[in-house]
Image (tube, rainbow, N blue to C red):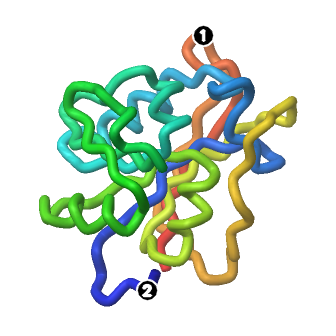
Amino acid sequence: MQQSTKQNISIIVAMGRQNQIGLNGTMPWHLSDDLKNFKKLTTGHPVIMGRKTFDSIGKALPNRLNFVITSKPENVIAYNVCAVKNLEQAIKKAALTGKEIFIIGGASIYRQSLDIVDKLIITHVDYDGKADTFMPDIDWKQWKVVEKQQFKKNERNNYDFEIITYTL
């Protein structure tokens, strides 16, 4: 899918040192400060996710327009959710808001959207443990760092991490 005009689409993801993003349907870490940042950035904006990500969250994220991509949209019955068959439909509908669109997972949806996003907001977690879901490879040569925040392990965050914003 080619992007005809800049649509202000961002991927937001937390990943470990080996591109780990999930384990048993959840994230393999707890980072309270990262979750606060995610909420601050995505509130008031459309978010696009796959069905497995939606299932792991368990409900629509409040104060956001939630799009869930699934082969069986009729099976997603949830308040404040728009179920669609593919990424193209989700982006077309989300773009009607005129606001920045956030792709929030999982791996398959990230893979499909890497060519069309113009921003990556990546939480790099100092985690090197088990995972069963991984972020697709990113061609780092095309991205430049525009912002970086560092966080130390503490009572709210069980790993050191940094949130880096990249643009094309």
Q: Quadrant of residue 127?
A: top right
Judge left or right: residue 99 versus residue 69.
Answer: left
Look at label 1 and name its amino acid. Glu
Quick check: 114 above or below 32?
Answer: below
Mark 2 highlights which residue? 2
Q: Quadrant of residue 27?
A: top right
Mark 1 to mark 2 CA distance (whole Å): 44 Å
Q: Quadrant of residue 36?
A: top left
Quick check: 58 above or below 68?
Answer: above
Q: Secondary structure at mark 1?
A: loop
On residue 101, the disc is none
Judge left or right: residue 41 versus residue 96.
Answer: right
Mark 1 highlights which residue? 155
Image coords of residue 163 (percent x, y): 54, 47
Q: What is the total number of numbered labels drawn onto the structure image?
A: 2
- Give whichever of 113, 168 is nearer the camera: 113
